[in-house]
Image (cartoon, rainbow, N blue to C red):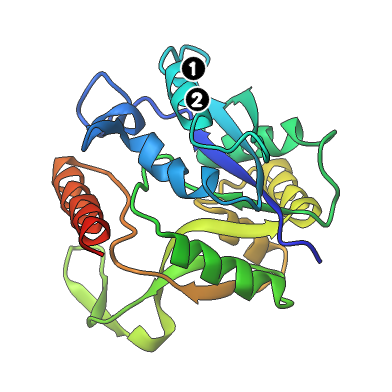
Amino acid sequence: MSTAYWLIVPAAGRGRRFGTSLPKQYTTLNGRAVIEWSLAPFVADPRCAGVVVALSDTDEHWPVIESRLGALRDAVSPLVWVRTIGGAERADSVRHALNALAERISGDDWVMVHDAARPCVSPAEIEALVAGCTAGATGGLLALAANETLKRADGGGRAGETLPREQVWRAQTPQMFQYAVLSAALAAAHAAGRIPTDESQAMEWQGHRPLLVAGCATNLKITDSADLELAAAILAARQLSRSEA
């Protein structure tokens, strides 16, 4: 089976929780927008056939980003860009993006979904996910194994139970599934009035058991200014390491 894939990026958020009028995916990070860093490893990957971005209907920032990212791809293997309107929830945006791909993709083709505000994913992590999923798994996701003692809180904000940490992982992106199976899972969730917080949960509701592929703690999601500072340090360290190599 081919390892080619399409990338879906739900980017319709308006950044209210981030505390600025500018959506967090467009915040400047080491000279680029956050979303540029998030997409750059995929744009550089020749297996990525195209990118579908689900945007707010009032988004005025994306065209400039698309133009800059498009310049990173060699003309020998041009990247297809598809825009669609996002939804109220992440799952709605991903479902809209999948629908926008219906005429371009086969049911057993692979799609990845990646957060617009997750700028530090590495090519090595993407490679590990592709290798794990195409080895015969239903699909999978990058995830971080718990390495601390975890507590379940009771209703009063007190520790009510200690969880076995060897059974707990923190979900990351990208997440990778075959087009038809993921489309069916998200459609079923929508029809049932259920809102999955990630693609893996929708798959789990349909009885699938996605593969957990070990990711890195550096693959963080930007949710506040402290995350932005940490991401800046991670990206700067990588750039310095490359310059010294």
Give the structural element (helix, strand or loop) at label 2. Answer: helix
Judge by depth and name the residue closer to the eye, 149 or 56: 56
Mark sitting on residue 63: 1
Q: Check the image and report above or below for 163 versus 176.
A: below
Judge by depth and name the residue closer to the eye, 201 or 233: 233
Residue 129, by quadrant, is bottom right
Inter-mark Cα distance, 1 to 2: 5 Å
Report whether residue 140 is seen: no
Residue drawn at x 47%, y 31% is: 69
Residue drawn at x 75%, y 47% is: 183
Residue 242, by quadrant, is bottom left
Judge by depth and name the residue closer to the eye, 87 or 238: 238
Residue drawn at x 23%, y 32% is: 31
In the displayed structure, does residue 139 sit left or right of residue 153?
Answer: right
- The location of residue 195, given as percent across then percent down, is 56, 46
Q: Do the residues under discs 1 and 2 have CB atoms within 8 angstroms?
A: yes
Residue density around tag 2, few if under 14, some if 14–19, many if 20 or more, within 10 Å: some
In the displayed structure, does residue 178 sit left or right of residue 174?
Answer: right
Amino acid type of disc 1? Pro
Which residue is tagged 2? 66
- The location of residue 128, given as percent across then percent down, is 53, 71
Residue density around tag 1, few if under 14, some if 14–19, many if 20 or more, within 10 Å: few
Residue drawn at x 36%, y 42% is: 37
In the displayed structure, does residue 130 sit left or right of residue 162?
Answer: right
Mark sitting on residue 237: none
- The location of residue 187, given as percent across then percent down, is 74, 44
Name the image quarter holding the C terminus: bottom left
Q: Check the image and report above or below for 230 versus 160.
A: above
Report whether residue 52 is seen: yes
Q: Check the image and report above or below for 49 versus 126.
A: above
Amino acid type of disc 2? Glu
- The location of residue 241, given as percent across then percent down, is 22, 61
